[in-house]
Amino acid sequence: MFLKLITFFLPWSLRRRALNRWFGFEIHPTARIGLAWVFPNKLVMREGARIDHLTVAINLDLIDMEPKASIGRGNWITGFPTNTDSAHFKHQPKRQAELWLGESASVNKDHHIDCTNRIYIGRFATIAGYQSQFLTHSINVEDNIQDSAPIYIGDYTFVGTNVVVLGGAVLPAHSVLGAKSLLNRACIDDWTLYAGVPAKAIKEISRGAKYFTRAEGYVI
């Protein structure tokens, strides 16, 4: 903990070097972390990736960010690492407590992301707005155990504000999840707007919509 505190208060140019050397992280010279407490077991940040101020990311096996992927301010990212003697999740030996962000994927701010199991957010995907919850674990009441399942958010997707996404959910590529929706299943149809509680297919999305063909992650 003392070494983490020392590292936290270093200027970024020194902090990046310290994180790579002391903690074995792989942070590209053009990547950047703000005033954020980011200490998974392993961190990979490629060219132009960034994590903004006041984000907390702890108790994960891995965070892997492709070029220009970004995590905004005030996000709470946590999990339950696999290198523990706890009885929790012993029935899931292949579980991976990881967060993966594809190229130019963007997580906005003030979201809660539970990576007890793997969460994958695809290329050019946007987790928009505020106060969404991605929850990969819960109690299995039938077996009276903690259980978990991964979440998959496809490429070129748009996730609206204040949604709940549960373990086992899949949002297919080139799709939209409407604000305040609950996604609790694996959807299969791409180019679709999903919305509601629980979310269901509402309508097809035009394949000419420019969001789904953009070459830059940032939308002006």
Image (cartoon, rainbow, N blue to C red):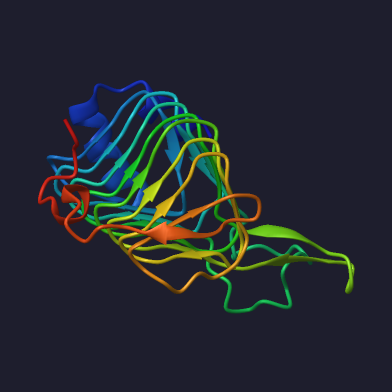
Residue drawn 34% across and 54% down?
Answer: 157
Residue most extreme to the front: 203
User: In the rendered picture of this protein, how many numbered marks are placed on residues?
Assistant: 0
- In the displayed structure, 124 sits above or below 37; it is below
Residue drawn 18% across and 38% down?
Answer: 218
Residue drawn 14% across and 48% down?
Answer: 47
- In the displayed structure, 217 sits above or below 129; it is below
Q: Is residue 72 left or right of residue 130?
A: left
Question: Who is closer to the viewer here, 182 or 205?
Answer: 205
- In the displayed structure, 187 sits above or below 105; it is below
Instruction: Give residue 118's position: percent from left, percent from top.
Output: 50, 63
Quadrant, the C terminus: top left
Question: Who is closer to the viewer here, 189 or 103?
Answer: 189
Q: Is residue 30 left or right of residue 205?
A: left
Question: Who is closer to the viewer here, 68 or 90?
Answer: 68
- In the displayed structure, 108 sits above or below 163; it is above
Instruction: Give residue 205's position: percent from left, percent from top.
Output: 32, 58
Instruction: Give residue 45's position: percent from left, percent from top.
Output: 26, 49
Instruction: Give residue 186's position: percent from left, percent from top.
Output: 54, 70
Residue drawn 44% across and 41% down?
Answer: 160
Q: Is residue 123 left or right of residue 41?
A: left
